[in-house]
Amino acid sequence: MTIDLSVLDDDQRVAAEAPRGPVCILAGAGTGKTRTITYRIANLIDRGTIAPNKVLAVTFTQRAAGEMRDRLRTMGIGGVQARTFHAAAMRQLQYFWPQIAGDLPWRLLDNKFPLVGRAARAAGLDTGKDMVRDLLGEIEWAKASVIGPDDYAARIAETPRTPPADPARVAQVYRNYEEAKTSPEGMLLDFDDLLLHVAGALENAPAVAEEFRAQYQTFVVDEYQDVTPLQQRVLEGWLGERDDLTVVGDANQTIYSFTGATPDYLLNFSRTYEHATVVKLQRDYRSTIEVTELANTVIGKAKGRVAGTRLELEGMRGHGPQPQFNGYDDEPAEARAVAQAIRKLLDDGVPAREIAILYRINAQSAAFEAALADAGIAYQVRGGEGFFQRAEIREAISNLVRAANRSDLPNDPVAVARAAFAPIGLTQNEPEGAQARERWQSLTALVDLIEEIVRTREAEDLPQVLRSLRQRAEAKQPPAVDGVTLASLHAAKGLEWDAVFLVGLVENTLPISHAIKAGDDQIEEERRLFYVGVTRAREHLHLSWSLSRQEGGRKNRSRSRFLDGIAPELEVEKSPERLKRNRRCHVCGNPLVTPADKALGRHEDCEPSYDENVLAALKRWRLDVSRAAGHPAYMVFSDATLIAIAEAMPTDEREMLNISGVGPMKVENYGAGVLSTLNEHRH
Ligand code: ATP
Ligand code: MG
């Protein structure tokens, strides 16, 4: 049997046929990277260069590993190990443990939560669920970045990350957690410990290293742009002094930086291995010319070091329909339109499993699940349970059931729901902290759904609302093969569909609010996420957004900045307000609509950020000035303008002019007084 390499193009074939040794494929989305390494493995084995059981291929997900094994098997190649880093490390540790730790028993810790909770309590920190989850994420990041508890505080200061608590405390939680896993009776190992111990054994136990390296000789890593320093250390342990390593990746698809992943190893590969075969691929076999052109434009706007490595994609699938851009008044309208467009595709013969709806955060799935269910379209939610299966939603509904049993019930089910969800995280404003935010978004989506149920008269009182919710929750999920896919952009990595709907493309969702706060690097990561989304489509690509979250609600959202210069602008979006930076809320970044909000420089219900003492001082100053001039205080400055000044803390007259409600006359009359008042309060 011979592997037919004529199905590869010339560049791909160079990578597939290169002799054993370092090979790097640096290429954009859909250029056949995954396909090429599969052929490379098959070809090396087929030519007798290496035995199948001496090859270890690493993929990003278990599913990708399964697909690679299947593809190899259909080419007549069995026995290749294709696994994720974690799965590979798990097996290796099970095998080598007796050699490194004797009969000290160990067990995989699959739920870190209770241990981290205890560690947090011992460090004197809040042990609410969300805080514990954030601490857990932080410990995972530190371990993936090969940062120990003693170095944590110093290292975090060098990164743009916001730690969930004071760094010294986080370090203490981390230390407590590590200590709690070890006892004379045995050890608990979390997923990262598996990697740490494998790396340690290969570095320090020569017998282990020798045996391992005799077994595995050829290594292949897909999605290498998202490797963490810890995974890289394992990879180096596997290799030892050898260099039989093939890596493929696209730095412009780095989307897991928040877990510690970095494209540096990919970008530096040809420096690390100067004799490496480096192949760049530009022909995009996945997508039509229309889709690849859009993808090129999207990533063409990227900035920074990673962006400098991009290559223009060349669409190989010929022409297809133009990508569609659609803005809607509100999210339910957006969801209904998407469901309708999907219905049309299905009628035209596109199979449901070839259609996907992709979004930034899981809470966004709710509206689309509802619209698909209403339209009778089968779907499945990937990389997470359906909306109603989520822990916070189940908790919320049981709170609502409990509330329904009370006698003093208000009439309005929406008000009851808000009250019932308040104790489990539905605060008035979106909270800080990744977990708290996700929970808040889910709960808000549930309130919106209840509002919708009431508004459309599907239900009038709470028992009826509960019945409607139950019906939705019980609607059976269809079998995986037949449904439309709903997935987050992160979960869509490496996959492809005939038709892709990128939905909810609004500021604060994509880019996500915490990325906007964190600055340029994070914005670029969000842009890459958008690029990943666009490049999932083979043929049909629909991009949409909506200006209000609720049906008929206030249009306080604006479409994603990533659409600027890409999608035609609608009249409402072109208004001068949108263009002026000071007409956007300085807290949430969305446009300001009412005069009061404009004067404040933020929405009234967005969390203010001024110092009370500064405002009090400005008011005292205003009182003095107005008394001296003999006219009412508001003629000097309105309360809203004073708040805006206290928030902006201008340092000179030019900066004062940027504040809404402060014109040249005001600056001339009061500028000096305001600035000297502020000067007394600067730190
Ligand atoms: P991503 O960056 O999204 O992971 P990728 O570079 O790994 O993409 P693949 O998934 O390997 O790309 O390939 C994209 C699509 O193009 C697949 O459907 C694949 O079968 C097809 N393809 C790749 N190379 C060729 C080729 N030479 N001829 C025909 N089809 C190809
Ligand atoms: Mg791939």
Image (spheres, rainbow, N blue to C red):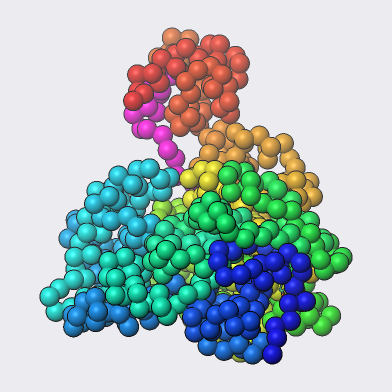
Q: What residue is shown at x 51% (from left), y 28% (from top)? A: 641
Magenta segment main secondary structure = helix
- Which quadrant is home to the C terminus? top left
Q: What residue is shown at x 68% (from left), y 58% (from top)? A: 280
On the picture, is 316 further left or further right than 256? right
On the picture, is 676 further left or further right than 72? left
- Residue 413 in percent (x, y) is at 49, 71
Work out whether residue 161 or residue 407 is closer to the camera in this orientation and state it: 161
Question: Is residue 584 part of the magenta span, yes or no?
Answer: no
User: Looking at the image, how many numbered discs can be counted on the residues?
Assistant: 0
Q: Quadrant of residue 493?
A: bottom right
Q: What residue is shown at x 50% (from left), y 14% (from top)? A: 670
- Residue 538 in percent (x, y) is at 75, 70
Residue 577 sits above or below residue 32 on the image: above
Span colored in magenta: 605-623
Q: Quadrant of residue 275?
A: bottom right
Q: What residue is shown at x 71% (from left), y 61% (from top)? A: 281
Q: Is residue 462 something one can see in this rendering?
A: no
On the picture, is 232 further left or further right than 635? left
Work out whether residue 413 or residue 255 is closer to the camera in this orientation and state it: 255
